[in-house]
């Protein structure tokens, strides 16, 4: 019997890769998406056909992590074996502008979903395995390097504070109710599907447009911050692996390499044979009230227990993103005539 998975945040970067991966494994995949005045299914259009009863392949349901009633209805309709909670206001800088909203969606949204799952399991007697999208941002002002599962959290943004709340709720549902619930503590992961206001994609997208004469400059904030950047396609496989274990647990997923924003920038512009110093301007407005200076993950536990390791290296990730954004810029240029 093929399994059924429900993904919140299916229209996002990770949701799209996870849906593809689960479908390739024969899962029946359902996704929850928000109503919006513009279409948000660009990353998953190739996977789904139709809504509700008319759907084939991937099935989509309108819902929101702010709406507990809807979450309960969707669980009842879908009857999932596995739930992947990827939905979030996931932009750290924007969480300083929208702290209450971010806390509601990221923190309370997780609690609403866990509580709905608990009631659903009690009513139906059917077990659900739950994945929570935790973040390396929870380590914030890091107290040890590299960061591992036992490293204490010191969140530095409304987003990270909300993720810490969600992390502990997940642990508590595991301990209090015996729910098979896991936290993936994922370090930054990128791809050509990354939203354009995260720093890697902002750099590759703008640099490609500069190369083709479509744009003149690139505004950036703090170039000294260091991140452990991997490929999103590799990371969603770890989410699935965590739910296939005999016992639930929490896992760091990371490459074990760290690079500064400046190094990423230099590598991208070098690939395009451009001198970044001619195009980049530093905009103080893009700095954060409190910054996470250094993230570097130790994913030994995941490598040992799950047998997971990243396949795409840092230079390969840069190449993949630059190539995709060059193709996109070329299409834009042709469209401009
Ligand atoms: P993303 O591209 O920003 O996608 C976020 C998804 O959440 C989108 O589908 C978005 O829908 C949805 N969403 C936003 N608000 C919602 C709400 N109120 N109710 C339901 N859904 C909502 O993020 P991502 O990079 O794929 O990341 C997936 C998850 O992993 C997030 O929880 C993120 O915080 C976490 N995470 C990401 C990274 C990373 O480096 N990418 C690292 C660690 C943890 P719309 O399309 O309508 O906006
Ligand atoms: O690309 P970023 O916005 O990602 P950030 O803040 O590390 O968060 C991402 O990874 C987390 C995992 O650690 C996720 F939980 C979270 O949801 C998200 O996916 O910024 C990376 C670094 C920061 O230090 C930022 O200050 O780049 C620096 N930066 C410099 N200039 C910039 C910019 N960031 C953005 N977004 N835009 C800039 O112009």
Image: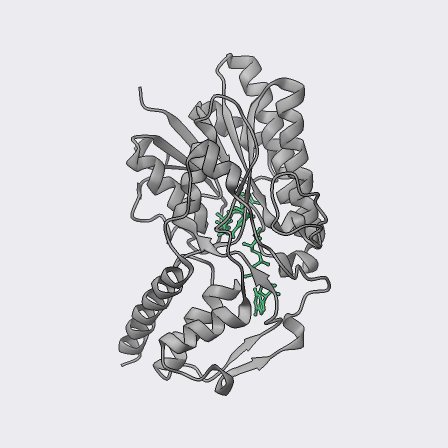
Of 1 and 253, the residue lying toward us: 253
- Residue drawn where x is 64% and y is 29% of the image: 171
Quick check: 150 above or below 140? above
Looking at this view, is 282 or 334 the one in front?
Answer: 282
Tell me residue 94's x, y (percent). Answer: 63, 60
Q: Percent position (x, y) of residue 323?
A: 32, 67
Give the answer, above or below, for where 6 lies relative to 247: below
The total number of labels drawn is 0
Residue 274 or 327: which is nearer the viewer? 274
Residue 126, image x and y in percent?
A: 48, 15
Quadrant in which residue 112 is drawn: top right
Q: Position of residue 161 (x, y in %)?
A: 70, 47
Which corner quadrant of the figure contains ligand 2?
bottom right
Task: Give the residue drawn at x 52%, y 65%.
Answer: 199
Q: Is residue 171 left or right of residue 61?
A: right
Vertical placement of residue 21 versus 227, above or below = above
Which quarter of the image is occupied by the N terminus? top left
Q: How is the image coloured?
A: one colour
Residue 192: name its quadrant: bottom left
Q: Is residue 79 shown left or right of residue 64?
A: left
Quadrant in the picture for residue 5: top left
Depicted 13 relative to depicted 149: above or below: below
Q: Residue at x 52, y 29 (%)?
A: 130
Q: Name the one closer to the observer, 200 or 334.
A: 200
Can residue 74 be seen here? yes
Residue 61, visible in the rendered structure: no
- The residue drawn where x is 44% and y is 47% is 14
Q: Quadrant of the C terminus?
A: bottom left
């Amino acid at each position: 019997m093929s399994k059924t998975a429900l993904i919140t945040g299916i229209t996002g970067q990770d949701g799209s890769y996870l849906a593809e991966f689960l479908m390739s494994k024969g899962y029946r995949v359902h996704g929850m998406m928000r109503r919006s005045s513009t279409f948000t299914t660009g990353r998953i259009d190739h996977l789904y056909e139709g809504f509700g009863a008319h759907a084939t392949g991937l099935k989509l349901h309108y819902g929101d992590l702010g709406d507990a009633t809807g979450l309960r209805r969707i669980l009842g309709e879908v009857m999932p074996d596995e739930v992947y909670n990827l939905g979030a206001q996931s932009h750290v800088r924007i969480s300083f502008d929208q702290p209450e909203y971010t806390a509601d969606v990221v923190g309370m949204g997780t609690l609403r979903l866990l509580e709905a799952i608990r009631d659903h399991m009690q009513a139906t007697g059917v077990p659900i395995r739950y994945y929570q999208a935790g973040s390396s941002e929870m380590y914030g002002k890091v107290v040890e390097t590299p960061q591992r599962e036992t490293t204490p959290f010191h969140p530095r943004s409304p987003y990270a504070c909300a993720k810490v709340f969600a992390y502990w709720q997940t642990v508590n549902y595991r301990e209090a109710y015996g729910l098979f619930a896991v936290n993936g503590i994922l370090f930054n992961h990128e791809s050509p599907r990354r939203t354009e206001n995260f720093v890697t994609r902002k750099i590759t997208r703008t640099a490609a447009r500069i190369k083709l004469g479509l744009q003149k400059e690139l505004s950036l904030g703090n170039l000294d911050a260091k991140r452990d950047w991997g490929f999103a396609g590799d990371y969603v496989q770890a989410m699935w692996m965590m739910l296939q274990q005999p016992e639930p647990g929490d896992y760091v997923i990371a490459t074990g390499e760290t690079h500064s924003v400046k190094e990423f920038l230099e590598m991208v512009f070098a690939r395009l044979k451009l001198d970044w110093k001619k195009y980049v301007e530093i905009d103080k407005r893009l700095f954060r009230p409190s910054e996470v200076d250094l993230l570097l993950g130790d994913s030994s536990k995941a490598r040992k227990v799950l047998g997971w390791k990243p396949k795409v290296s840092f230079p390969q990730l840069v190449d993949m993103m630059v190539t995709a954004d060059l193709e996109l810029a070329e299409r834009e240029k042709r469209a401009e005539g």
